[in-house]
Image (cartoon, rainbow, N blue to C red):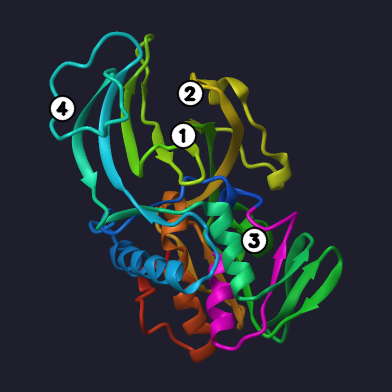
Amino acid sequence: MGAATAYFLARRGVEVTVVERSGVACAASGKSGGFLALDWCDDSPLGPLARASFALHAELAKSIAIDYGYRRVDTFMLAARERGPVRGEHRVAPPHWLDGAGVVTAALGSTETTAQIHPASFTAALIEAAPARVHLGVVQEIVQRDGAAVGVRVDGATLAADAVVLALGPWTSHVAGRLLLRIRGLKGYSVTLGAAGVPPHALFVDYRTADGRTLEPEIFPRPDGSVYVCGMADPQPLPDSPEGVVVDDAACAVLAAAPITRRQACYRPVTDDGLPLIGRVPGVAGAYVATGHGPWGMLNAPGTGFALAELIVAGAATTIDLRAFDPRRS
C-alpha cells in the first residue's frame, strides 16, 4: 500500500519518502502469493476497487520498465487426497503437468480474469519507478501541530512531511492507536519450491489429509522457475515487528513434500468487518491510512494508491469510491 501510494503520488509531482523498518517488502508484501482476480470480489463492496486495480495492474506492467513477474494465468479448483483417489472425473480439461492424484472440479478463471505478480519484486519496482526515497527506521507516532500531521517520529527524531500515510499493515494501530478501528494480524505460512517450466496455471485445492483434516492450499507457479504454496493459518499473536515473525518448519512441511527452497510466514492485516481502511485518519488533518486488505492486498494496492494520491493532492478521490472503506465507520 505504501509503495503504490508513493508511486501514484510521485506521478503527480509529489516528493515522497517511504519509511521502512528494515527494508522494502520486509513483511507480507514480500511473502504473499501475488494472485490477482478481476471479479472475485464482485459480491462485496470491494468489487469496484478490485476491478479498477486489476486494470491498473495491466497498465503498470506496460508502463514500468522492470520485470516483476506479471502475467495472465488460467485458474483451476482441484480436489486431492493424501491417501486414495478422488471420486469422479475431471469436470474441465486439466493442466497437462498435473499427475493423476487429483481431479479438476472447476475452472475459476482465465487469462481474461486472473493474473499474478511476484509481490516482493512488484513492491520494489513501484519504489524504484516512483522514484521514492527510502528511509530505514521505526515509526513511533504521528507528529502533530494544532491538530494536523506535520511528520512522523522515527527512532526518536522528527521526519517532517506535508502529509502522512500510515501503511504499516497489521502494525498500523501501533502508531495510530485509538484513532483507528482495531486492525489485527492473521498469520499464515508459505513455501516456495524449485520447479522450472511449470505453465501459468494457478490452483486452489480442496485437500484431505490421511488423518481427516481439510486444508485449502493455494499453488502459484511463477515465471522465475519457482512455485509458491500457501494455506496454513496460525492463531499466534502479532509480534512487535516483522523481525519477530517465527517460521514453524512443521507447518511449512505440511504444504509440500517436494524439496523446499524457502520457508516463510507473515501476518496479513485484517479488520473485523473484512474491509480495508482507506482514507483520512479521524481527528488528524493531513494524515491518511491504507491497511486491512486481508488476502487481497496485492490485488488492490494499485487502486488504493491511485485513490489516495487523488485524495491527498486534489482533496477527493473521484475515480474510485472510497466511502465503504472510510476509517471513521463504526
Label 4 amino acid? His
Separation of marks 4 and 3 at Cα, in angstroms: 51 Å
Nearer to us in this view, 34 or 136: 34
**Percent of width and height locating residue 233:** 48, 33
Q: Name the residue under label 3.
A: 177
Precedes in sequence: disc 2 or disc 4: 4
Q: Mark 1 points at which residue?
A: 229
Position above or below: 157 against 121: below
Q: Residue 256 carries which label?
A: 2
Mark 2 and mark 1 residues within 8 Å of each other at the beta carbon = yes
Q: Which of marks 4 and 1 is nearer the N terminus?
A: 4
> From mark 2 to mark 4, how far is it between C-alphas?
23 Å
Q: In this view, does 165 lie above or below 269?
A: below
Q: Mark 1 is on which residue type?
A: Val
- Mark 3 touches mark 2? (CB < 8 Å): no
Separation (CA) of disc 2 from disc 1 = 8 Å
Q: Distance between the residues labelled 3 and 1?
A: 34 Å
Q: How far apart are marks 4 and 1 (CA)?
A: 22 Å
Q: In this view, does 113 lie to the left or right of 150?
A: left
Residue 326 can be seen in this image: no
Quarter assignment of residue 59: bottom left
Report the amino acid beneath label 3.
Gly
Near mark 2 (Cα within 10 A), the count class, few <14, some 14-19 or many ≥20, is some
- Give the magenta range: 1-25
Task: Pick the quarter of the image with the N terminus.
Answer: bottom right
